[in-house]
Image: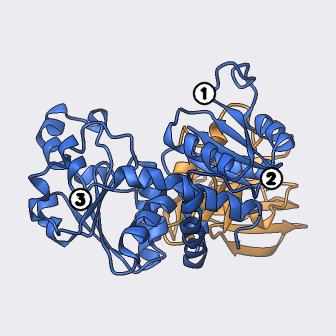
C-alpha cells in the first residue's frame, strides 16, 4: 500500500495548508462549516510537513474564503497558508494575519460582559491590541482575550 | 466639548475636558444648596439596575438643583425588567421619555450598549467591575480643589485594586496628569493588566507596593478602597493582611501633614472612625462635592 495520503485536487475553492496538527476541526469551526452546508470538504490530519513536522490540511470545494474569513483562521492556525483555487490552478496564495477587528463570530469569555446578557441585541466585537502574539480586547467589557480564549 | 456627549469610560476624556468640568463644578458649588434654573423642562432618567446611594442621590440632587426633573427606578423590582425585558428595550423607552439617561448595571459594557441604543446622552453611573467614570472625575476634582492642582501629586491607592471599579476609572483619568501613583495591595489584588497596560502607554508613572509603611511619607493623597474577605483564596491570608489595609491614626503618624485621605464610600472598616476627626479625612467632603461635580457634568452635556 502506498504511504502517501491522497486527497483529490479541487476544481474551485480554497485549500488551507500548514494548519498546526490537530487544529483542522477548529478551523472548520471558526469558519462556521458544520458539514450541513452541502459543500465538499476534505480534511487531512497529522500528515508530514517539512515546515511544521506534522500538519493538517483543509480543502473546501466551491467556496472562496473572504479576506475576513482568512484572517479569522489565524485565531486557531497562525501558521496557515491559504490557496484560492480556480479551474484546478492556485490563483492566490497568502498567509493569515490576525484581523484588526473581529465581529460577531466569538463570544466574550467574561460572563458578566453585556454581550453575554440573555437576549440583549448586541454583537460581540474584539479589537486587536497586540499583533505578536495576538491579543484582543472586548469592545464592550474591555477584557483581554488571546486568540485561543475566543474559541 | 461636552455637549450631547455620552460618558461611558474615563478613557474618553482629555485633560482639557476634565479642566473644563472642574472649572464649571467650582462655579456650581455656589448653587449646590440652592437652585439654578438652567435646565427647566429637561428630564433625567435614572436607570439603576443595581443598588447605589451616593451616585444615584447626587445625580438626582444635581439635576434638581439645575431646575430639571428626574424620573427612573432603582433595583429592577416592580419594573418590566423583572418580567425579562432587555436592557436595550428599557433604554429605548427611557430615551423616548427623557433628555439624558444615567445608568448603573452589573454587566460590564451595559452603558456602552445603552449609548448605542439611545439618542439621548448616556452617563455611566457604574457598570460591572471596570467603569465608574464620574466617580473618577469626582475623585480628581477633590484633589484639584484641595491642592489647587493635580500635577505633581503623589497618589497612593490602597486596598483591593483589582475589583474596585472606581480604581480602574481613576487610574485611566489620572493618565491625563503628571502624577506619581503608588499601587498598594496584595500582589493578586493589583489592577488588571488591561488597566496597567493602558495607563503605562499613556506615560503614567506608577509603582507596586505591598506595604503602606514603605511609601506613606511620600503621599499627598491616599485613596482607600475596601478589601473584601471573599476575595481571598485563603482566609488566613486575609487575617494576616487586613491590618495593613486599614487606615488608622497610627498609620498616619509618618504621613505628610497635608496628606488627604479619600474613599469612594461606602466604607466598612477600612478607615478607622478616629481618622474622621483628623485634618487628613476628606472623604465626606469628597462625597459632598459629588453634587456640584455632577451638576457641572449634566449642565455641560445638556446646555
- The blue chain is B
Mark 2 nearby-residue class (10 Å; few <14, some 14–19, many ≥20): many
Query: Whole-Å distance between the Cαs marked 2 and 1?
Result: 22 Å
Residue at position x 59%, y 69% in the image: B21
Please provide percent x and percent y for residue A59.
Answer: 74, 55
Q: Residue under label 3, please give it.
A: B279
Q: Tell me which corner region of the image, top left, top right, bottom left or bottom right, holds residue B70.
A: top right
| Alpha carbon distance from label 3 to label 2 | 42 Å
Q: Is residue B279 left or right of residue B81?
A: left
Q: In this view of the protein, which residue sits in the foreground, B190 or B142?
A: B142
Could one spot residue B212 in this view of the protein? yes
The x, y position of residue A75, in whole percent, is 59, 58
Name the residue that disc number 1 marks: B75
- Most foreground residue, B176 or A130: B176
- Residue placed at 72% from the left, 62% from the top? B301
Q: Residue at x 57, y 65 (%)?
A: B25
Task: Mark 3 or mark 1: name the one nearer the start of the chain.
Answer: 1
User: Is B183 on the left-hand or right-hand side of B256?
Assistant: right
| Chain A drawn colour | orange
The image's colouring method is by chain
The label number, if any, that marks residue B120 in the structure image: 2
Q: In x, y percent, where is residue B265?
A: 39, 44
Chain name for mark 1: B
Q: Are the residues flagged by discs 3 and 1 in contact, CB closer than 8 Å?
A: no
Task: Find numbered disc 2 in the image and state the secondary structure of the residue it sits on.
Answer: loop
Amino acid at each position: 500500500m502506498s504511504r502517501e495520503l491522497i486527497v483529490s485536487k479541487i476544481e474551485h475553492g480554497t485549500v488551507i495548508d500548514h494548519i498546526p496538527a490537530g487544529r483542522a476541526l477548529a478551523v472548520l469551526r471558526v469558519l462556521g462549516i458544520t458539514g450541513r452546508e452541502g459543500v465538499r470538504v476534505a480534511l487531512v490530519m497529522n500528515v508530514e510537513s517539512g515546515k511544521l513536522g506534522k500538519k493538517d490540511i483543509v480543502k473546501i470545494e466551491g467556496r472562496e474564503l473572504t479576506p475576513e474569513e482568512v484572517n479569522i483562521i489565524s485565531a486557531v492556525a497562525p501558521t496557515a497558508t491559504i490557496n484560492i483555487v480556480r479551474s484546478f490552478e492556485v490563483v492566490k496564495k497568502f498567509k493569515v494575519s490576525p484581523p484588526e477587528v473581529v465581529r460577531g463570530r466569538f463570544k466574550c469569555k467574561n460572563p458578566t460582559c453585556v454581550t453575554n446578557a440573555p437576549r440583549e441585541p448586541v454583537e460581540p466585537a474584539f479589537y486587536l491590541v497586540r499583533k505578536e502574539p495576538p491579543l484582543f480586547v472586548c469592545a464592550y467589557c474591555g477584557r483581554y482575550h488571546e486568540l485561543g480564549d475566543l474559541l | 466639548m461636552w455637549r450631547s456627549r455620552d460618558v461611558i469610560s474615563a478613557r474618553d476624556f482629555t485633560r482639557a475636558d476634565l479642566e473644563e468640568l472642574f472649572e464649571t463644578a467650582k462655579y456650581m458649588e455656589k448653587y449646590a444648596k440652592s437652585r439654578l434654573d438652567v435646565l427647566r423642562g429637561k428630564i433625567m432618567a435614572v436607570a439603576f439596575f443595581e443598588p447605589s446611594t451616593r451616585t444615584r442621590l447626587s445625580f438626582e440632587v444635581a439635576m434638581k438643583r439645575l431646575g430639571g426633573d428626574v424620573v427612573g427606578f432603582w433595583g429592577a423590582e416592580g419594573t418590566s425588567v423583572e418580567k425579562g425585558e432587555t436592557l436595550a428595550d428599557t433604554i429605548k423607552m427611557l430615551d423616548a421619555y427623557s433628555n439624558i439617561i444615567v445608568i448603573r448595571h452589573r454587566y460590564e459594557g451595559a452603558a456602552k450598549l445603552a449609548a448605542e441604543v439611545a439618542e439621548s446622552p448616556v452617563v455611566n453611573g457604574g457598570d460591572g467591575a471596570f467603569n465608574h467614570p464620574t466617580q473618577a472625575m469626582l475623585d480628581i476634582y477633590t484633589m484639584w480643589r484641595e491642592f489647587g492642582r493635580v500635577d505633581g501629586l503623589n497618589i497612593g491607592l490602597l486596598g483591593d485594586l483589582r475589583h474596585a471599579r472606581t480604581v480602574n476609572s481613576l487610574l485611566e483619568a489620572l493618565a491625563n496628569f503628571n502624577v506619581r501613583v503608588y499601587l498598594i495591595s496584595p500582589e493578586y489584588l493589583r489592577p488588571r493588566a488591561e488597566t496597567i497596560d493602558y495607563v503605562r502607554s499613556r506615560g503614567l508613572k506608577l509603582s507596586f507596593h505591598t506595604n503602606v509603611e514603605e511609601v506613606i511619607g511620600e503621599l499627598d493623597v491616599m485613596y482607600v478602597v475596601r478589601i473584601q474577605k471573599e476575595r481571598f483564596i485563603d482566609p488566613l491570608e486575609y487575617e494576616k493582611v487586613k491590618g495593613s489595609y486599614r487606615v488608622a491614626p497610627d498609620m498616619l503618624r509618618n504621613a505628610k501633614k497635608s496628606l488627604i485621605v479619600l474613599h469612594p464610600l461606602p466604607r466598612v472598616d477600612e478607615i478607622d472612625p478616629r481618622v474622621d476627626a483628623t485634618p487628613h479625612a476628606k472623604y465626606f467632603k469628597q462625597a459632598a462635592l459629588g453634587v456640584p461635580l455632577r451638576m457641572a457634568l449634566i449642565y455641560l452635556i445638556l446646555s
